[in-house]
Image: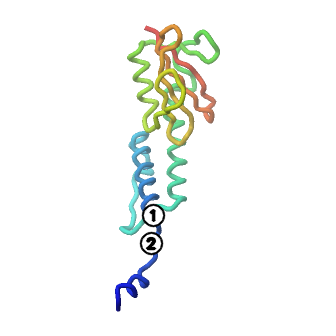
Amino acid sequence: MTDEENRGAEEPTDPLAEIRGQEWANAINTLRALDPKNANLSYVTAPDWGPTDKDIADLNAEIAKVAVKRVTDYVMPGGNLIGMPGGGGDVRNAPGGAEAARAAYDYLSVGGTPYAGPYPGEMTELPGNVGYVGYRNNNQSIPTVDVNVPSAHIKVRFHYQQ
C-alpha cells in the first residue's frame, strides 16, 4: 500500500480538539485559582478523552458561579456589606488604607483578565464575565476598590480610609 493510500485509511481528526483542550486547561486553572477544593477539579478521564463544547460550557458556568460567590462572600459576609455607609448610596468606608485596598483588589481579581480600556487605575474583568473589580485613588486620593457584579446586585465603591 502506498503512502497516499495509507493516508486515506486514517481516521479523521478533529481540527478543534487541540483548541478545546487548551480552553479546558485554561478553565481548570482558573477554577483551581478561585476554589482549589472545587469538586469539579477531581475527575478521571480516558487516555483518548477530549473535552466537548458542552464540557467547556459546563466548566465555564461553574467558574461564573464560583466567581460570584467569591466576591459576594468577601464584600457581603453574612449578607451585609463590609464597611460603614459612606458619602453616597454606593459608597462604603472601610479601614486599612492602601494596604487593605490592595489586598482586597488582589483577592477579588484572582482568575480575572486585566482590562485595557478606560479606567483611572487597574481594572480586572472577573472570571465568567460576571463583572469587574477596579483599584484606584478617588478624587480625594483615597484608595478605592470598585466592585460591580450585576447578577449579585453588587455595585459598590469601597473607600479604604487610613
Above or below residue 111? Residue 134 is above
Amino acid carrying label 2: it is Thr
Give the alpha-carbon distance from disc 1 to disc 2, as whole Å. 8 Å
Q: Is residue 32 above or below residue 159?
A: below
Q: Amino acid at mark 1?
A: Ala
Where does the image place residue 129, in percent across and percent down from the top left?
55, 40
Work out whether residue 9 or residue 36 is closer to the camera in this orientation and state it: 9
Depicted 76 relative to depicted 160: above or below? below
Q: Which residue is mark 1?
A: 17
**Location of residue 100 (image quadrant):** top left
The image position of residue 26, as x and y in percent, is 42, 49
Can you identify the residue that label 2 sits on? 13
Horizontally, is 151 left or right of 137 in the view? right
Labels 1 and 2 touching (C-beta < 8 A): yes
Judge the density around disc 2: few (<14), some (14-19), many (≥20) Cα neighbours within 10 Å: few
Residue sitting at x 53%, y 59%: 53
